[in-house]
Image (spheres, grey):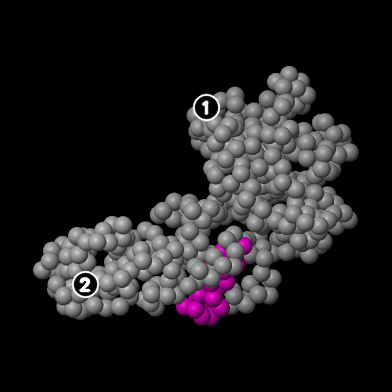
Amino acid sequence: MEQLLDDLRWRGIIYQETDAEGMKETIEKEKISLYCGVDPTADSMHIGHLLPFLTLRRFQKHGHRPIVLVGGFTGLIGDPSGKSEERQLQTMEQVELNVQGIKKQLERIFDFEGDSGAIMTNNFDWAGPMSLITFLRDYGKNIGVNYMLAKDTVASRLETGISFTEFTYTILQAIDFLHLYQNFNCKMQIGGSDQWGNITSGLEMIRKMAGEGAKAYGMTIPLVTKADGTKFGKTEGGAIWLDPTKTTPYEFYQFWVNTADADVVKYLKFFTFLEKAEIETLEGSVEAEPHLRKAQRALAEEMTRMIHGEDALQQAIRITEALFSGDLKKLSADEIEQGFKDVPSYEHEKSEDSGLVELLVAAKISPSKRQAREDIQNGAVSINGERVTDVQYSLSEEDKLGGKFTIIRRGKKKYHMIQYK
């Protein structure tokens, strides 16, 4: 088991530990259960949620049992961690929808079979039926207000204000750890660096309620940062979601393939299950032949396969190659839709005249018929990757990819999508 901790340290994954020696000794001599949780604040996780869960998966690969907790109860309250103001409360119905969406995504990451098969839990199951008297007498008595005020998550909010609801969040998460410790023999919690205060509250609750001999541990993962100082996991279009309807597999693949040279080795260590030797070979490639982008492609392939599966990965690669070569006719309608999701689009009636000059003006690709004719004659217009220089050209059924779309390019980079109604 030494190799698990050595591997985590080599990858730079361990940020804080509550009792490094005790944890090392425990996981070397026994197979433990350990957990990581996520609150269902949306109906999908984004890539900012991944690292703690992938770390939990590394423990599973070494024979330990992961407990995956979806916070159906804590999601109704709101975690003040990392927030400068109160969260908007969500309805019970919305939280339940979010729980179902997140569960499906976690099922892709973990193996639920065998001796170390993952366990999926929802803290609404035990916290939902709890009475206020139980909360105050059994749990509230064990966590002092001074102890809570010393937590960064609370202290940082005292100036701007924190409601009693969010103030109690750390106790609720402590109850989760205690419940899992008592009912699943769960001896460790993993979380992002912003969860340190919540994790240590759990350990305090276990110490007070399970006795001095109770052995439990906490470990946090570093915040993922980019070398240029911008926020990891965000693009101009917003967060990179795991839900393919929010971030398509092609966009997901492109996010990873566009990783900067300065970040790619770190991300390979953090997010992939590639072995040390393979990552070191890719690191050599970044230094010796960065133009080949082997490390970025390996990262994009590993992540897209893990989250969306082999078929979606191959589709993302096909779209990428077709856009690079300009040969768009190989793509299906679905692939065209993914690859050109963000380009300007124009709806065109199938029955309308499809003369190219008129279409360029109607779709606002060229500002006037005179300019449209000039663009065509100058070879500046391509249809589905093929240059057209005939000003009399009319679009035919063959130009409608999948019967649904035509991609027109004006100049080198200005793409437009024609959609047929």
Q: Could you say which disc has been placed on residue 394 in the image? A: 2
Which percent across, then down, holds residue 40? 59, 41
Magenta span includes 288: yes
Q: Is residue 77 visible?
A: yes
Figure check: 409 above or below 387? above
Q: Could you say which disc has been placed on residue 200 in the image? A: none
Quadrant in which residue 71 is drawn: top right
- Mark toward the viewer: 1 or 2: 2
Please tell me whether mark 1 sits on a helix, a strand or a loop. loop
For the C terminus, the quadrant is bottom left
Residue position for label 1: 161
For the N terminus, the quadrant is bottom right
Dot 2 amino acid type: Ser
What stretch of residues is rendered in magenta? 285-306
**Mark 1 to mark 2 CA distance (whole Å):** 64 Å
Quadrant in which residue 295 is drawn: bottom right
Q: Residue furthest top?
A: 133
Q: Decide which of tag 1 and tag 2 comes sooner along the chain.
A: 1
Magenta span includes 314: no
